[in-house]
Image (cartoon, rainbow, N blue to C red):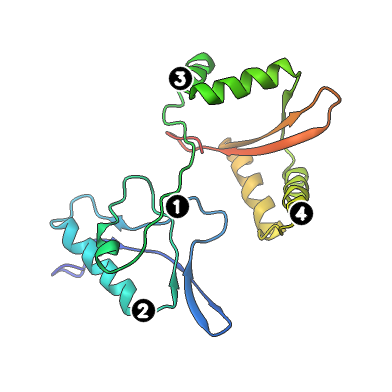
């Protein structure tokens, strides 16, 4: 807040209690979660420091957030928080042709695509959120893990993205038609994740 009590910055988060611990976690199925700053803010650095101070004052046992690319983290580091970088693959310009997108891949990724083509793997588009959820659950189960996403929420989110024309489900299949992997690809007006 500034003098006129207008909101100039905020930091949304999800708070949970696990046993005796109060924890701030990244919400499931949420790519990133970070602060929002008003575009016309006078002092962005001061607002960021204030948000970090407010978060620290909550005195939680654990704080985990995935900030968008380009977010300055030095305010957190100054308070003693550890910062770990994660990487995610994004396509920044959705107006490019398929050939142009292929050329933007690393040489290792291009080799993997060519190898898959030589081995007769195919890509199939499917719009069944229920099939994707079952396949996803099966895959994580094979690794000895659980799908922590609530079925109704995951299916609802996928169906909503499909309905809006902002997502698709892709399956990689072998030459016998067996599903090998699946991808729920989602995008907005500028970027695909």
Whole-percent x, y for residue 11 in the image: 35, 63
Which element is circle 4 on?
helix
Q: Residues within 10 Å of mark 2 (few under 14, many from 20)?
A: few
Instruction: Return the disc, 4 or 2, that comes first in the chain's sequence.
Output: 2
Q: Residue at x 78, y 43 (%)?
A: 131
Whole-percent x, y for residue 137 in the image: 75, 52
The residue pinned by badge 4 equals 141
Which is closer to the viewer, label 4 or label 3? 4
Are the two marked residues, 1 and 3, in contact with CB atoms closer than 8 angstroms? Answer: no
Whole-percent x, y for residue 150 in the image: 68, 61
Instruction: Return the disc, 1 or 3, that comes first in the chain's sequence.
Output: 1
The residue pinned by badge 1 equals 32
The residue pinned by badge 2 equals 58
Are the two marked residues, 2 and 3, in contact with CB atoms closer than 8 angstroms? Answer: no
Q: In this view, does 176 lie above or below 144?
A: above
Are the two marked residues, 4 and 3, in contact with CB atoms closer than 8 angstroms? Answer: no
Instruction: Return the disc, 2 or 1, that comes first in the chain's sequence.
Output: 1
Q: In which quarter of the image is residue 44?
A: bottom left
Using the numbered discs, state the Cα–Cα distance from disc 2 to disc 1 in whole angstroms: 21 Å
Q: Residue at x 69, y 51 (%)?
A: 155
Using the numbered discs, state the Cα–Cα distance from disc 2 to disc 3 in whole angstroms: 45 Å
């Amino acid at each position: 807040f500034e003098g006129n009590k207008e909101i100039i910055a905020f930091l949304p988060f999800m708070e949970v209690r696990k046993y005796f611990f109060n924890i701030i976690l990244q919400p499931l199925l949420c790519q990133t979660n970070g602060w929002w700053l008003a575009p016309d803010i006078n002092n962005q650095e001061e607002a960021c420091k204030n948000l970090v101070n407010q978060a620290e004052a909550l005195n939680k046992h654990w704080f985990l957030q995935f900030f968008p690319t380009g977010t300055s983290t030095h305010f957190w580091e100054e308070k003693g928080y550890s910062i770990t970088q994660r990487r995610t693959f994004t396509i920044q310009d959705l107006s490019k042709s398929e050939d142009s997108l292929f050329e933007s891949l690393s040489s290792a990724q291009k080799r993997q695509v060519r190898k898959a083509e030589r081995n007769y793997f195919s890509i199939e588009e499917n719009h069944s959120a229920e099939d994707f959820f079952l396949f996803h659950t099966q895959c994580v189960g094979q690794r000895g893990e659980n799908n922590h996403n609530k079925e109704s929420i995951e299916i609802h989110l996928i169906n909503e993205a499909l309905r809006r024309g902002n997502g698709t489900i892709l399956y990689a299949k072998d030459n016998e038609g067996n599903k090998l992997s699946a991808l729920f690809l989602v995008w907005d007006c500028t970027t695909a994740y």
